[in-house]
Amino acid sequence: MVYTPLLLSLLFTWLLPNTVAERVPVVAAPEVIVEIPASALLYNEIGLDGELAEPVFEAGYERMQRMGVQGSVLAIADMTQPSTAKRLYLIDLERKELVMRTYVAHGQGSGELIPTSFSDKEGSHQSSLGLYRVGAEIVSPKHGAALLLHGLERGLNGNALSREVIMHGADYVSEQFIAAHGRSGRSWGCPAVPREDMKDMIDLLADGGLLFVYGRR
């Protein structure tokens, strides 16, 4: 009988869970904050889904950010696509819209339908990857109206000027050529575009636009 009060006390403590629960601190689960990259937000705002693969846009935009390069219009040449596709995208970053999509050639040294190799070496006749600043409009003796390209990445495209890699119009970049040959014509490394699109390229990119050439090495 000496231990009866103690046993009763323990029994009632077990039977009253609310009393025990009141003494247990409740720890709230921490909030999980998911940070969405700026490139992903911009990709959705522009409405590029179904037009340009997100990793390609992300690579170009993040390259700009990492290098501290600014420009209102970014042209992206997606060289993972065949030359039969409209794989050049002109994107207005300020207005957040896809302005234009068209064909673009790759260098004859880079491959046939899809480029598989890239180089910045003189005489390689290959396309060069990376980010370019688009310069002044010029008149090429061979191609007519054209745009200078300043390669911003040493080791990737830093020899663009010395290699005379320019953006120009060409008759071999056309639906007629593709229909006849099963692929677009190829350049000596220049991102050539349809001749009828060259005026738009000049209007949108000259003196300050950016070009990003994306590909798998």
Image (cartoon, grey):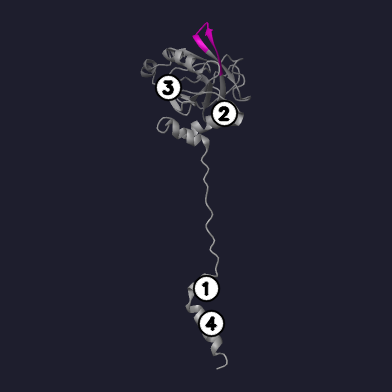
Q: CA distance from mark 4 to mark 2?
A: 70 Å
Residue marked by disc 4: 10
User: Residue at the spot x=48%, y=72% of the render?
Assistant: 18
Does 142 appear in magenta? yes
Disc on the earlier residue, 3 or 4: 4
The quadrant where residue 49 appears: top left
Residue marked by disc 1: 20
Q: CA distance from mark 1 to mark 4?
A: 12 Å
Q: CA distance from mark 2 to mark 3?
A: 20 Å
- Which part of the image, by quadrant, shows the N terminus? bottom right
Front position in the image: 134 or 81: 134
User: Residue at the spot x=45%, y=15% of the render?
Assistant: 200
Stretch in magenta: 134-146
**Amino acid type assigned to the residue bearing label 3 in the image:** Met
| Residues at discs 1 and 4 in contact (Cβ within 8 Å) | no
- Which part of the image, by quadrant, shows the C terminus? top right
Disc on the earlier residue, 2 or 1: 1
- At which x and y percent is residue 153? 61, 25
Q: Spot the residue most to the top.
A: 141
Mark 3, mark 4: which one is toward the viewer?
A: 4
Indicate the secondary structure of the residue bearing disc 4: helix
For label 3, the crowd category at 10 Å Cα-Cα, with few meaning under 14, some 14 to 19 and many 20 or more, is: some
Front position in the image: 139 or 216: 139
Residue marked by disc 3: 100
Label placed on residue 64: 2
